[in-house]
Image (cartoon, rainbow, N blue to C red):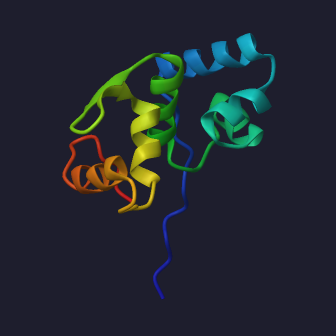
Amino acid sequence: MALSKPRTARRLPADVKAALAEACKRLGTQAKVGVELKVSAPVVSQLLKDSYMGDVDTLADRIRGLYMAETVRCPVMGDIGRNNCLDYQKRPLAFTNSQRAALHQACKTCPNRKEA
């Protein structure tokens, strides 16, 4: 049986961490920021303390889209926030909604796609 490498925490880029800290200050609590980012307050705390063991890259993209107004070019929706792009990628296929069907098809080969 092979032993797996221990996971280590990764830091947010400095500009992203600063935007996250500013959002916490502006909203007043890490819990409110967590709601906006769709994560728990402890995840926000761990990101600020550089101790988060999860997918830092995806959360950095969510923070960039939500608090730093970064956009990506979506082949279906046009220019959208990075956080919205990540949300659209998670939505299931729905043939009853033409936009979601188009997104499902376009997301498969989009350069902005995060691997599942």
Could you tell whether 5 is left or right of 26 in the image?
left
- Residue placed at 74% from the left, 12% from the top? 25
Q: Looking at the figure, which quarter contains the C terminus?
A: bottom left
Q: Give the camera-side residue of 111 and 50.
A: 111
- Residue placed at 43% from the left, 42% from the top? 86
- Residue placed at 40% from the left, 61% from the top? 94
Q: Residue furthest front?
A: 96
Q: Is residue 52 above or below residue 115?
A: above
Could you tell whether 82 is left or right of 35 in the image?
left
Q: Give the camera-side residue of 43 and 108.
A: 108
Could you tell whether 10 is left or right of 115 in the image?
right
Q: Is residue 59 above or below residue 69?
A: below
Give residue 81's position: percent from left, percent from top.
Answer: 41, 27
Q: Give the camera-side residue of 82 and 12.
A: 82
Answer yes or no: is residue 26 visible.
yes
- Residue placed at 33% from the left, 46% from the top? 99
